[in-house]
Image: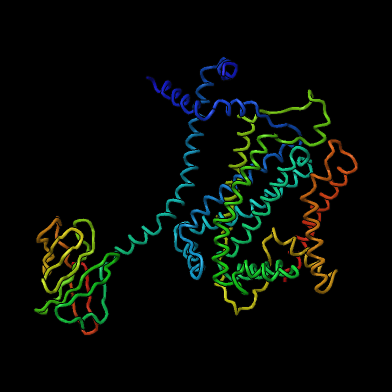
């Protein structure tokens, strides 16, 4: 490496010359970064497309469940609200209750158990109240979010409360 | 320890095990001839760069592409639904064309500089094999969107192997996965395009590049005739590499421009009952062989003529591939001149048949 010393080091420079070179290198560096960003941006957006589509799906504020008014007493209908699963329960006393079915603990899908009249998460044994969504026992830190339900002759409309 | 000593001890550790300084010493002594024809030395590197682009954009397309019955729908999604999907697909299609183009330029420059002569015969042969695999890449990739054009292109293209007497039909059926171009064909071509061909291409390319390192760039005969003191060279590192990278940047810019200004289109989904669309023609790099076969079919009529045409065409390609074995001399003698004229004839035939092909599109 000894004979390969930088030839530029042997040239005596004017102080101004060094500044122009530094400015040039800085400009070249910025141009290079901008170029790389211009290449990386479309690739990132391309790969992020499914995520963006899912985000658009969460923008849903209302779902119409056709013919859901025929749901018998004491039974449940699973449906998709936006991109996450949700429950529509027709209780024995005739009340209609709907809430998200995503457990607030680690995101498993919960289920309604009519015989025990509770909402249960099989993953870690979380239990919720089937009327209010309140977390009753087990690890869930928060209640399940309730939706507003409107029953009419052709179906059931569920919307954000 | 300062960061400098850490870096140097890491380097020493790796160097001791991988022999980096030998490589560095080799790279320092590597030179590239400088003469009036030096410009042509960049085309191998440009081809390599475009192949790398194909690997990247290909993997990106693979993220959403589905072979088989959903092929068209998935390409439609890539083109019209996914952000910048049209650009990725367009870049892949354009880079394919540009790669074939730059390989052809590379091939003819090697041919006319007589760089295939001893000891570089294997470089020429592996290069021809790479061109062959690259055209199968092009042919198989063309079917994958399963639109009208790709359907008919594949249908017509597979008529060529089926014209081989005796075994032709069996070969064509094997490639198609049945008597007709169908979802089976897409699956086969997909496996070929993303698994089999890369598995052949990459080691061949490694061999080709290793030979270039071993023997260096060939100088044309006119340079070799000069005494050693009059020949000029430049160091590979950093001079040639810097110019090489500048060429890559230019190639990338041209690709970006073409891909965004002329986005690749997607036709109607294929329909086996639909008539062939008006003006259908092969990709430009297949235009010449198609036209040659068509013209030979006019001259030599009937089934015997078809076979004779394919034989004649194959003979031309074999002669081209075997050029290092009958133009061997160092000097620019009679054989060398004959090879030179054969090369000019090949360029003329390629250009003429391509022009006739485009001229006669109905």
- Tell me if B177 is positioned left or right of A93 in this view: right
**Front in this rendered view, residue B163 or B296:** B163
Q: Residue at left 79%, top 37%?
A: B220
Residue B83 seen in this snapshot: yes
Point out the image quarter for the N terminus of chain B: top left
**Front in this rendered view, residue B63 or A68:** B63
Q: Residue at left 59%, top 45%?
A: B49
The residue sitting at the front extreme is B166
- Tell me if A93 is positioned left or right of B172 in this view: left
- Numbered circles on residues, count: 0
x, y percent for residue B227: 82, 25
- Tell me if B288 is positioned left or right of B61 in this view: right
The quadrant in which residue A122 appears is bottom left
The residue sitting at the right extreme is B334
x, y percent for residue B29: 65, 26
x, y percent for residue B326: 84, 45
**Front in this rendered view, residue B205 or B93:** B205
Residue B280 seen in this snapshot: no
- Tell me if B153 is positioned left or right of B297 in this view: left
């Amino acid at each position: 490496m000894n004979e390969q010393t930088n030839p530029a080091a042997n040239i005596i420079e004017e102080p101004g010359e060094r500044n122009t070179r530094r400015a040039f290198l800085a400009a070249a560096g910025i141009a290079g970064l901008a170029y790389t960003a211009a290449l990386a941006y479309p690739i990132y957006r391309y790969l992020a497309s499914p995520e963006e589509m899912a985000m658009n799906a969460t923008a849903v504020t209302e779902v119409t469940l056709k013919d859901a008014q025929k749901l018998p007493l004491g039974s449940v209908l699973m449906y998709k609200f936006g991109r996450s699963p949700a429950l529509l329960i027709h209780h024995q006393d005739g009340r209609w209750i709907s809430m998200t079915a995503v457990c607030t603990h680690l995101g498993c899908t919960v289920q309604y158990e009519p015989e025990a009249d509770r909402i249960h998460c099989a993953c870690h044994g979380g239990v919720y109240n089937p009327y209010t969504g309140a977390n009753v026992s087990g690890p869930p830190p928060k209640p399940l979010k309730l939706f507003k339900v409107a029953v009419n002759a052709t179906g059931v409309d569920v919307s954000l409360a | 320890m300062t960061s400098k000593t850490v870096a140097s001890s890491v380097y020493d550790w790796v160097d001791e095990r991988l022999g980096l300084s030998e490589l560095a010493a080799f790279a320092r002594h590597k030179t590239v001839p400088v003469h009036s024809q030096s410009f042509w030395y960049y085309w191998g590197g440009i081809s390599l760069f475009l192949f790398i682009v194909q690997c990247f954009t290909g993997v990106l397309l693979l993220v959403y592409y589905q072979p088989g019955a959903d092929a068209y729908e998935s390409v439609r999604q890539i083109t019209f639904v996914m952000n910048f999907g049209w650009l990725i697909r367009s870049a892949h299609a354009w880079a394919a064309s540009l790669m074939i183009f730059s390989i052809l330029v590379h091939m003819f420059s090697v041919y006319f500089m007589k760089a295939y002569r001893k000891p570089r015969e294997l470089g020429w042969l592996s290069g021809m094999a790479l061109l062959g695999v690259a055209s199968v890449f092009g042919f198989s990739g063309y079917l994958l969107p399963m639109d009208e054009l790709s359907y008919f292109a594949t249908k017509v293209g597979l008529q060529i192997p089926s014209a081989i007497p005796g075994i032709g039909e069996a070969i064509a059926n094997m490639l198609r996965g049945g008597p007709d171009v169908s979802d089976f064909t897409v699956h086969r071509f997909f496996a070929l395009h993303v698994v089999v061909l890369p598995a052949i291409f990459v080691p061949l390319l490694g061999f080709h590049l290793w030979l270039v390192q071993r023997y260096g760039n060939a100088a044309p005969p006119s340079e070799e005739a000069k005494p050693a003191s009059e020949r000029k060279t430049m160091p590979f590192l950093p001079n040639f590499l810097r110019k090489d990278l500048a060429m890559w940047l230019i190639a990338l810019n041209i690709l970006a421009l073409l891909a965004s200004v002329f986005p690749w289109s997607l036709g109607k989904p294929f329909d086996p009952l639909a008539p062939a669309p008006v003006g259908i023609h092969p990709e430009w790099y297949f235009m010449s062989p198609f036209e040659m076969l068509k013209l030979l079919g006019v001259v030599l009529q009937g089934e015997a003529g078809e076979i004779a045409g394919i034989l004649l065409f194959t003979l031309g390609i074999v002669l081209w591939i075997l050029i290092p074995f009958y133009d061997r001399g160092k000097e620019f003698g009679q054989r060398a001149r004959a090879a030179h004229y054969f090369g000019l004839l090949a360029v003329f035939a390629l250009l003429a048949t391509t022009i006739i092909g485009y001229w006669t599109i109905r």
